[in-house]
Image: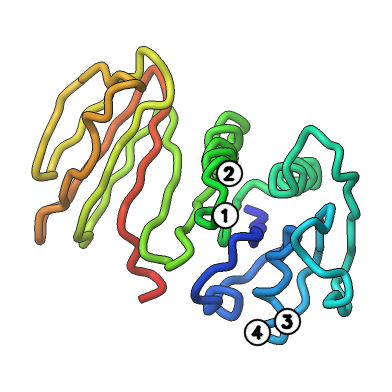
Amino acid sequence: MKRAILVGASSPLDTCFLKRERGFFVACDRGYEAFLEEAMEPDLLVGDFDTLDRKKIKNPGKTIVLNPVKDDTDVFFATKWLLEKGYDDFLFFGCLGGKRIEHAIANIEILSYLRDRDATARMYTNDLFQVLFVLKDEERTFENESGFLSVFSQEKGTIVSESGLKYEISDYNLDPFVPLGVSNEFLPGKKATIRVHGGKILIVKECHEYH
């Protein structure tokens, strides 16, 4: 798999992931500042530079300057560019939070867009406390997990089963407009399994890999 790490303009509170991850690094507009904090340069800098002062730019590998009058957000443009280059594993940081919630919603929608194109993707909250990802017609097993897990249907007619969690369901038609799946819990020492068919689900769970 070819991995890309994208950093958005909603500055992550902890930039430790930049030193730990390996792949093709992309800064989206003000996301470039996270690289400056770690004295690093991204492989690609993308943006219309409405949030980043161009005077701060030093020496990124490649820069794509976008017209501010455009259909795609900076993050979505970068995502599609990477897909065309053959990348199929995506990590997103600095894409949730900030003052404008519409950008967070737009970024979450990218997870579903990527899953429809057979790519995997994870999106982390700015404090690295939670991770979001989409499952489509597949089963996922979780071992040695703890904390909360929420499941949200992305499509009408999505059938979901959840076992090994505090609240279980079996072949349940999960409505995308009813938040039934919020705040389930992993059980200590118990393996949990989520199966989805006929649609997609968004999973939000606690993230332990950076703590």
Circle 3: is it few (<14), some (14-19), or many (20+) Cα within 10 Å? Answer: some
In the depicted structure, whether residue 116 falls above or below residue 106: above
User: What kind of residue is marked 3?
Assistant: Met
Can you identify the residue that label 2 sits on? 107
| Occupied quadrant, residue 4 | bottom right
**The residue under label 1 is which amino acid type?**
Cys
Q: Residue flagged by tag 4: what amino acid is it? A: Glu
Q: CA distance from mark 4 to mark 3?
A: 5 Å
Q: Which badge, 3 or 1, is on the more N-terminal residue?
A: 3
Residue drawn at the location 58% of the way across and 35% of the way down: 118
Locate the C terminus and report the quarter of the image it occupies.
Answer: bottom left
Dot 4 falls on a residue whose secondary structure is: loop
Earlier residue among tags 1 and 4: 4
- Point out residue 71 in the picture as x, y percentages from the top left corner: 79, 32
Position of 162 relative to 29 (above/below)? above
Residue at numbered disc 4? 38
Name, please, the residue furthest toward the top: 157
* Secondary structure of the residue carrying numbered label 1: loop
Dot 2 and dot 1 residues touching (CB under 8 Å): yes
Residue 70, x across and y down, in percent: 83, 36
- Which label's residue is closer to the chain start, 2 or 4? 4
- Residue 64 at x, y percent in the picture: 89, 55
Q: Which residue is mark 1?
A: 95
Q: Which residue is mark 3?
A: 40
- Residue in the image at 30% along x and 19% along y: 175
- Asked whether the beta carbons under mark 3 and mark 1 sit within 8 Å of each other, the answer is no
Dot 2 crowding, Cα within 10 Å, few <14, some 14–19, many 20+: many
Residue type at tag 2? Asn
Q: Which is more foreground, mark 3 or mark 2? A: 2
